[in-house]
Image: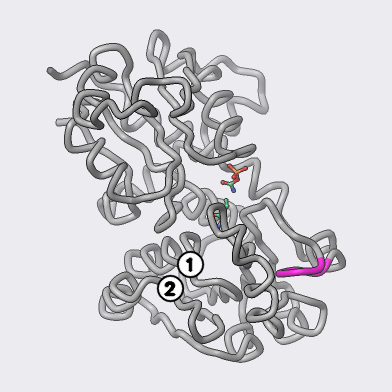
Amino acid sequence: MKKDMLTIYDLDADDFGEIFKRAERLKNLLYRGVEHASLRGKTLGMLFDKASTRTRLSFEAGIHQLGGAGIFLSRRDIQLGRGEPVSDTARVMSRYIDGIMIRTFEQELVEEFARYATIPVINGLTDLLHPCQVLSDLFTIIEKKGGYEGLKVAYVGDGNNMTNSWINAAARLPFRLAIACPQGYDPDGAILERGIREAKEGIELLRTPADAVAGADVIYTDVWASMGQEDEQDERVAAFQGYQVNEKLLGCAKRDAIVMHCLPAHRGEEITAGVIDGPHSVIIDQAENRLHVQKAIMEILMSGGREK
Ligand code: CP
Ligand code: NVA
């Protein structure tokens, strides 16, 4: 039976360790220049309804390094953009390719696609979630801190797709999550409620960034206006005053705290240049790890045969 990765909740307890172990191995092989063509002959479709640098490049380079091929699909250029139903698109694509990564607006679209597709569907970001990013970030935390168990992760800023996926992760894995968002910009209510109920080490929603960051091992932030919210830019900049990750806020965290951002970043808005380009920042290693972790995910999901 094919498996999808539409949310962190699609992963079983064992899957996390398996992804991180494979990612470490694949990273090692790549650095040693050892061929690792475990998906030779396989094809990944990559459907983008939104812009991307990291997701597109890491999936496309990743499937290539695994011996397969990636096909970039923009809604504009395929019949889906002219109204062909998702059900037909997903079933037809399943006869040609071995997996599909989708970046779009509604989470419902990736879910509908997955219902009809007989190939694995991977969520490459929706308005609601960004699971590949959080899995890569957890791998980066393992590399930098030796593990995430018992650590405190502070998320400061907009309660967006990144925050929602962090909540999902804290519901499944043993780390503390403290979120500081301005009122009116909270994470998804249902995701937060379930997260708080199931959290291993606790999830808190706070209003004061310094309280969230107090004693944190990891400080995480993201843009104030996500893709699709460009019209709200000015009102959001006003609403998020006081929620910037800056040198003063960094001073509230542990001395060896790391600073993370999924990128792209707006220096001078959600984070200062001094912090994002300073010694605590791990943003470039974090971006690199998208490649290794997504290769691990593709290996796990796409190694099998075809189903009708
Ligand atoms: N972090 C991330 O998903 O980046 P892109 O939008 O460039 O893919
Ligand atoms: N929250 C951001 C993440 C970009 C990777 C957005 O959705 O635009």
Q: Amino acid at mark 1?
A: Thr
Residue at the (71%, 86%) spot, across then down? 252
Residue under label 2 = 187
Residue at the (69%, 72%) spot, across then down? 257
Residue at the (57%, 58%) spot, across then down? 226
Q: Quadrant of the N terminus?
A: top left
Image location of residue 44, percent across then percent down: 41, 21
Residue at the (65%, 45%) spot, across then down? 287
- 72 and 169: which is toward the camera: 72
Q: Which residues are magenta?
A: 268-272
Q: Quadrant of the C terminus?
A: top left
Residue under label 1 = 163
Image location of residue 94, percent across then percent down: 25, 20
**Which numbered disc, 1 or 2, marks the residue that appears first in the sequence?**
1
Kindly report the secondary structure that dominates the magenta region of the rendered protein: loop
- 147 and 67: which is toward the camera: 67
Q: Is residue 75 above or below residue 281?
A: above
- Mark 1 falls on what kind of element? helix
